[in-house]
C-alpha cells in the first residue's frame, strides 16, 4: 500500500546500496554528506555565527532577498566556505530533527555550556514556518550547492542562488 500524502518517513542508512531496489524506488534520496570537523556528530558545541544564523532564518522564512544586503559579509566567508556550508547544513539538520521529533537535545542548542538564544529563536521560527518535507528539500539543495563548490563555482553567486531558492519553500 502507498502511504498517505501527509506521511513522512525518514530512513537513514550509511550505505544506500544495501537497501532493496523496491525500497529505493519509493524513496526520495538525500545525501547528507560527512561532517568531519564541525556538525551534528561533534561532541563539543558548534560555534554559531549570529549573522549566519540570521541569514539562514531570513532565508528559510521567506526573506531570501536579504542576502543581497550582506555581500561584504558573505565575501568574508569565502576562505571558509566549507565551514559556512557545514554550519548551514547543521542548522537544517537540527531544524528537521526538531520538526520530526518535536525537540532536540539540549547540548545542540548550547554554546560553551550556556543556552544559545539566537540559535533557539532561529530554530523556533524556522520550524514554525516549514514542513519536514521543506526542510528535507532545503538540505538537498544546500548539499548540492556545497558539492558544486568543489568544481569552483562562484561562492557569492552560490550563496545568493541558494538563499533565493530556499526562500521559496512552503509558498
Image (tube, rainbow, N blue to C red):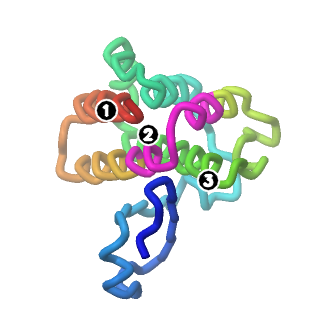
Which residue is at the front of the view, 168 or 51?
A: 168
Residue 65, magenta (yes or no)? no
Question: Could you tell me how far apart the alpha carbons at marks 1 and 3 are, in whole angstroms?
Answer: 27 Å
Residue 77's disc is none
Q: Position of residue 34 (x, y in %)?
A: 45, 63
Residue drawn where x is 33% and y is 25% of the image: 75
Residue 159's disc is 1
Q: Earlier in the sequence, mark 1 or mark 3?
A: 3
Q: Which residue is mark 3?
A: 100
Which contiguous range is marked in magenta? 122-138
Residue drawn where x is 61% and y is 47% of the image: 99
Q: Position of residue 74 (x, y in %)?
A: 37, 25
Which residue is at the front of the view, 105 or 148?
A: 105
Please tell me how crowded label 1 is: few (under 14), some (14-19), or many (20+) other residues with Cα within 10 Å.
many
Q: Earlier in the sequence, mark 2 or mark 1?
A: 2
Element at label 2: helix
Name the magenta segment's main secondary structure.
helix
Element at label 3: helix
Identify the image quadrant of residue 156. top left
Q: Position of residue 110 (x, y in %)?
A: 75, 40
Q: Is residue 21 above or below residue 66?
A: below
Identify the image quadrant of residue 111. top right
Amino acid at each position: 500500500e502507498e502511504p498517505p500524502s501527509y506521511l513522512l518517513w525518514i530512513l537513514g542508512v550509511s550505505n544506500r546500496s544495501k537497501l532493496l531496489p523496491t525500497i529505493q524506488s519509493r524513496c526520495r534520496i538525500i545525501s547528507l554528506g560527512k561532517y568531519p570537523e564541525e556538525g551534528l556528530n561533534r561532541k563539543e558545541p558548534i560555534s554559531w555565527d549570529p549573522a549566519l544564523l540570521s541569514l539562514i532564518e531570513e532565508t528559510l522564512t521567506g526573506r531570501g532577498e536579504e542576502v543581497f544586503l550582506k555581500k561584504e559579509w558573505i565575501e568574508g566567508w569565502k576562505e571558509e566556505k566549507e565551514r559556512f556550508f557545514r554550519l548551514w547544513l547543521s542548522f537544517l539538520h537540527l531544524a528537521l530533527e526538531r520538526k520530526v521529533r518535536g525537540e532536540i537535545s539540549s547540548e545542540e542548542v548550547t554554546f560553551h555550556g550556556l543556552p544559545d538564544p539566537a540559535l533557539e529563536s532561529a530554530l523556533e521560527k524556522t520550524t514554525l514556518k516549514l514542513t519536514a518535507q521543506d526542510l528535507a528539500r532545503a538540505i538537498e539543495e544546500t548539499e548540492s550547492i556545497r558539492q558544486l563548490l568543489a568544481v569552483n563555482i562562484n561562492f557569492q553567486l552560490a550563496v545568493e542562488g541558494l538563499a533565493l531558492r530556499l526562500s521559496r519553500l512552503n509558498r
